[in-house]
Amino acid sequence: MVKTDNRKALMPLFEGFEDSVLISCAEGRTGICWCDAPDAPTAGVIEAGDFYFTAGDPAFAREAFEIAKNNPEAVFMPASEGWTKALTGLGEGIVITTRFRTKMPESFDTDKLAKLADISDFTEYKLEMINEEYYDQALKEEWSWAFVGNFSDYNDFHKNAFGCCITHKGMLICAASCYSVYSRGVEVEIATHPDYRRKGLATIAGAAFIKECARRGLKAHWDAANTMSLKIASKFGYTLKEEYTALCFEKGEKLDS
């Protein structure tokens, strides 16, 4: 496969694939695009951070693997069962995992979100917006890279995205941010530093972020990687729409899922 800027030709391969990251890609905001033939592609891969969306002819599964093989955090998002079979059949330690697609409420209860975002019980912590200092911190750590990593630099992030973070003595310890953006919405990215988990910080940051999305009139898409993420989303009014299949490198080999 080769890189392509011809998104207009590539995107029809992904028609019917529900994911806001693909909307962002179609608008030219996110993603590195790969295909077999730029002018008339029959297979394509959209690389967006750790996610690799695959569509079209699954005979190109080996080529898709080659694009992602050096990323231990790779998550393949196959558009069809054929792609799932082809990728898992390569013998490269790619295994099936389950993710959870959520449904947004018709409107968010902003009063409830404000209460959930209350950080007053944590006197040593601060709830802030991601600024240039925290942008730089986020890029340096694996757990936090995705808060800002899909933007070319801080100016790009500051102009087109935003994030709500929790800090402790000037250190970024939790955040909810834009994994990707498009004209009408964002994809939520949320995580907590391993040393600060199980304190309820993700709920605080997530509530603040969703409230900010509502204030800006933006849809906040929440794709849950696990049941814990789904549980947090449910506090804000999201409901489970469906479970779906994704692929990752087997734990202990390439990806610690």
Image (cartoon, rainbow, N blue to C red):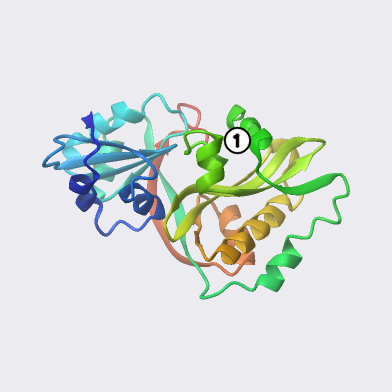
Q: Quadrant of residue 65?
A: top left
* Circle 1 residue: 143
Q: Going 20% across and 52% down the picture, which residue do you hit?
A: 12
Mark 1 surroundings within 10 Å by alpha-carbon count, few (fewer than 14), some (14 through 19), many (20 or more): some
Q: Residue furthest top?
A: 70
Q: Residue furthest right?
A: 123
Q: Position of residue 133 (x, y in %)?
A: 68, 33
Q: Going 27% across and 60% down the picture, which residue do you hit?
A: 16
Q: Going 39% across and 43% down the picture, which residue do you hit?
A: 30
Q: Quadrant of residue 244?
A: bottom left
Q: Position of residue 96 (x, y in %)?
A: 39, 44
Q: Amino acid at mark 1?
A: Trp
Q: Quadrant of residue 248?
A: top left
Q: Quadrant of the N terminus?
A: top left
The residue nearer to you, when weighing 60 against 212, is 212
Question: The residue tagged with tag 1: helix, strand or loop?
Answer: loop
Q: Position of residue 7 (x, y in %)?
A: 24, 44
Seen in the picture, residue 169 relative to 241 is either above or below; the reply is above
Q: Position of residue 221 (x, y in %)?
A: 48, 59
Seen in the picture, residue 29 relative to 70 is either above or below; the reply is below
Q: Going 59% across and 70% down the picture, which residue do you hit?
A: 237
Q: Is residue 237 left or right of residue 243?
A: right
Q: Is residue 9 left or right of residue 25?
A: left
Q: Residue furthest left?
A: 40
